[in-house]
Image: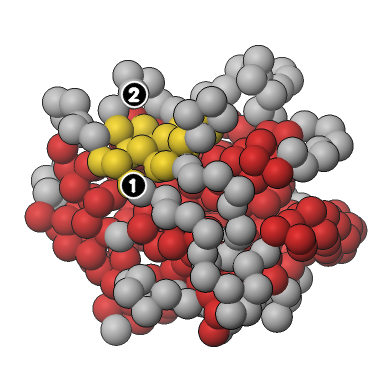
Amino acid sequence: MRRILGLVAAMGLATVAWAQDEESPRYEDVFFNAREVWMAHETRHRADDDRIDSDVLYVLGNIANTMFHEFGHALVSEFELPVEGSEEDEVDALANVVMVSETNSEYLDRMIEAVADDWFIQGEYDESQGPSEDGHSVPADRAYAVVCILVGSDPEYFGEVAENAGLEPAEQQECQGTYEDAHTRWDQALAEHYLGENEEPSIEIPIEYGEPAEGQEMIAEFVQASGLIEDIVEQMRWTIRFPNPITVGVESCGEENAFWSPDERKVTLCYEIVLGYYNRATDQGPDAGLGQGDAEDEESDLEG
């Protein structure tokens, strides 16, 4: 088992024994916890159960990808990792590789597909012609990067997703190299920083949930009740030998954002960015997204 994929066990989906925390909820629990909160507040649009499942996974997937992205910045900062090219693109690659499950998990597959969907949707409203001032690539490029990692990791399984995104067969084949290169770069960069098989975590990573602003109450409850942040944090602790204590804050920021603060050694997830995921999920039409042709059949299985 390749070590970097141990991070996927944050959702209870991997089989790496050393990476499992017995007190950490399995990802199925994360999904159903989040869904319960969603249903308690489901007044915005009266969707059917399958659509609600898709919306919940959409939001959870984008939260997870955002958190892994920001932890990528933390890893670069804390270990002074060398980065060729754009750091934003490189930590995007980490987040995408981590979320590609080798267990063919229906949950995780649909979550990472939702990340691509969200970047495509954002790209429809993005008029910029190049990277943003903070170094992020344009949304369309970030969407294609997700799809490329997907099809590169499993050409047969994610082939239809890639076709729906407009990737030609030759491009899909090139993506296999893109995936392997990204995986290898990060695995080599982190090799000396992985915890040993019988090694205990070196730090605690406390999570601080701030009071939501008006209109963010449901989002705050959704994030905290799901247990997703706790799962990701615990997996980071049980995978990486961090040199210094760090914290995670989930709070109202006044803007749609998430960020790593090196001076504070803090990863921050803003309620505003989660609200953005929620709005884009619920504003989509029922047939939106890159999902594969048998997604409708798969959705019915989520009820267990």
Residue plotted at (42% across, 54% down) = 204
The kind of residue tagged 2 is Cys
Snapshot quadrant of residue 21? bottom left
Discs 1, 2 touching: Cβ within 8 Å: no
Image disc number at residue 253: 2
Judged left or right of residue 46, residue 304 is right
Q: Is residue 45 above or below residue 124?
A: below
Decide: few, some or many residues near mark 2? Use Cα within 10 Å; few <14, some 14-19, many ≥20: some
Q: Say whether residue 253 is left or right of residue 42.
A: right
Point out the tag, 1 or 2, that comes first from the N-terminus: 1
* Disc 1 target residue: 207
Query: Horizontal and vertical percent for residue 162?
Result: 69, 58
- Tell me the quadrant of the picture where the N terminus can be found: bottom right
Closest to the observer, 93 or 187? 187
Q: Is residue 7 above or below residue 205?
A: below
Foreground of the two, 42 or 59: 59
Amino acid at pointer 1:
Ile
* The C terminus sits in image quarter: bottom left
Residue at image point 65% right, 15% down: 133
Residue 166 in picture, x, y percent from top left: 72, 50
Can residue 212 be seen from the camera position used here?
yes
The residue at 77%/62% (across/down) is 191
CA gap, disc 1 and disc 2: 16 Å
Q: Position of residue 137 (x, y in %)?
A: 69, 30
Residue 143 appearing in the image: no
Q: Nearer the viewer, residue 239 or 241?
A: 241
Question: Which of the numbered marks, if any, corresponds to residue 247?
Answer: none
| SS for dot 1 | strand
Q: For mark 2, give the secondary structure.
A: loop
Q: Residue shown at 74%/38% (left/top)?
A: 80
Q: Position of residue 174 (x, y in %)?
A: 88, 58
Between disc 1 and disc 2, the foreground one is 1
